[in-house]
Amino acid sequence: MICRLLVVFFLATCAVSAQDTIGLADFLRRVEVSHPSLRIASYEPDLAEAEIRNALGRFDPRLSATYEYKDKSGIDKVNVLDAAVELPLDLLFGPKVKAQYSRGLGFQIDPQKSTASGGEASIGVSLPLFQGIFTDTRRNALRKAMLRPDMAQAQYRMDRNNLLRTAAARYWDWSEAVSAVAIMDSMLRLAERRLSFIIDRARAGEVAAIDSIDATQEVLRRRGERLRTIRAAEQARIEAAVMLWTTDGLPVIMTGSPLPLPSASDSVLNEASLLTVAKDKRPEIRRAILLQQTTQLDRDLARELLRPFVEADASLISYDIANSTSPDLKVGLKIDQPLLFRSASAQEQVADITVQRADWQRSLVERAVTADVQQAVVAIERGRERLRLAADEVRLASVMVANEERRARAGETDLLTINLRERFLADALLRELAAKADVAKAFLALQWATGTI
């Protein structure tokens, strides 16, 4: 009987494998290509690019121009043109290059706007002397925007890793459930064959008729257990299918079956090297580092704002561009600063707190990553131990079933004992299957923990 059990179970497993199977790598590839959550995350690099362009736009040349004209009795009363081009530069001191032209004519023009008929023009530069030497609002926004592509990539990898971990876990749940159905199918076939054999013997008067009732009861029990495992397999298949979508954003009706659970690898796990890999590849750590850099940029800006704002201007000016005389020099100084610095000091305090929070957040993330790796390693080791024990339990349960069959042929046991032995074997097979699934999920958790999934 035990030989028949193993043969039947092997044939059931082969039948499952003979169907159209979906490998884990192919399953995860399909999830990664079409799942909406990753398609949403894929917009992050485009948003980062737009943010960079927006920050660069603050360094675009700016043109301003005004023109006013009035006449009286055919004579110019006011004829004023003012035009200027300003180009801020992303350099130390944050200089701004300026070019200006103005022409003011008319018999009733403001004397301060009056110029020669050719107009006057100037070209010069303005730069801060205290506040804004190392950074300013414009340059700080650009520095932060330049970090956005890396931040977007880290966020995408986080979303991807979490999604693939969930998808792979559901795949192994599906595989475990399908294998459990194969086990219950094998046990049910044994009970049905025994029932047919007992009915034939009862009709021949070799055994009591009550034995057929006992055998029928066992068949019904195993049919119920089979239906329970089938329901679990159907539910696992539906949950796995939820991860699959078409490129048009439509749900996929999944067909076929998963591959059987893999045999447990006996490779040696080096926790120190795994931690090194995790700290290098986990996107959570990269994201925390970028957050630190962002907050440090804000703190640098806040400290810069504590300095007084003093801006110097120097220009070469020609009061009449129609006249080719040497240009004159124009210089100026502008001071614009609150006297108590209360707003600036408050901004610095907030920036310092934000930096400290980012530092602590990185420490928390690194500690969590370390714990993830350690938990995965422990899960693999304990899972391997559990799988070895389960394999021994299956071997011993198989021996007991074989021994009980020999005793049955010798008339030394009864049907109840045989049924119990087979139930113990089925339970052992299911426990071995669960241990395999746990080991597979533990290796999956290790891949996720090290950022290599």
Image (cartoon, helix red, strand yellow):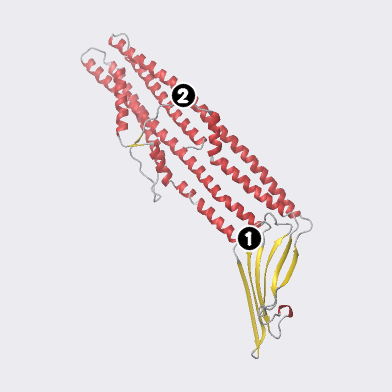
Residue 188 visible, this angle = no
Label 1 to label 2: alpha-carbon separation: 63 Å
* Label 1 crowd (10 A; few <14 / some 14-19 / many >=20): some
Residue 433 position by quadrant:
top left
Relative to 95, 211 lies left or right? left
Q: Position of residue 215 (x, y in %)?
A: 30, 19
Residue 27 shown left or right of residue 4 in the figure? right
Q: Which mark is residue 384?
A: 2
Identify the secondary structure beneath mark 1.
loop
The residue labelled by disc 1 is 89
- Residue 39 in view, yes or no: yes
Q: Is residue 449 above or below residue 307?
A: above
Quarter occupied by residue 211: top left
Q: Position of residue 26 (x, y in %)?
A: 38, 39
Q: Residue lying at the far bottom in this picture: please name it.
A: 73
Residue 40 is tagged as none
The residue depicted at 34 percent of the width and 15 percent of the height is 401
- Which x, y percent locates residue 16? 32, 32
Residues 69 and 414: in front is 69
Q: Residue at x 48, y 49 (%)?
A: 42
* Three-letter amino acid code of the residue under disc 2: Arg
Label 2: how many Cα within 10 Å (few below 14, some 14–19, many 20+): many
Q: For residue 5, what is the image quadrant?
A: top left
Q: Circles 1 and 2: CB distance less than 8 Å?
A: no
Q: From the image, which quarter does the N terminus lie in?
A: top left
**446 shown above or below 423:** below
Secondary structure at numbered mark 2:
helix
Q: What residue is drawn where x is 35% and y is 19%?
A: 422
Tag 1: amino acid: Leu
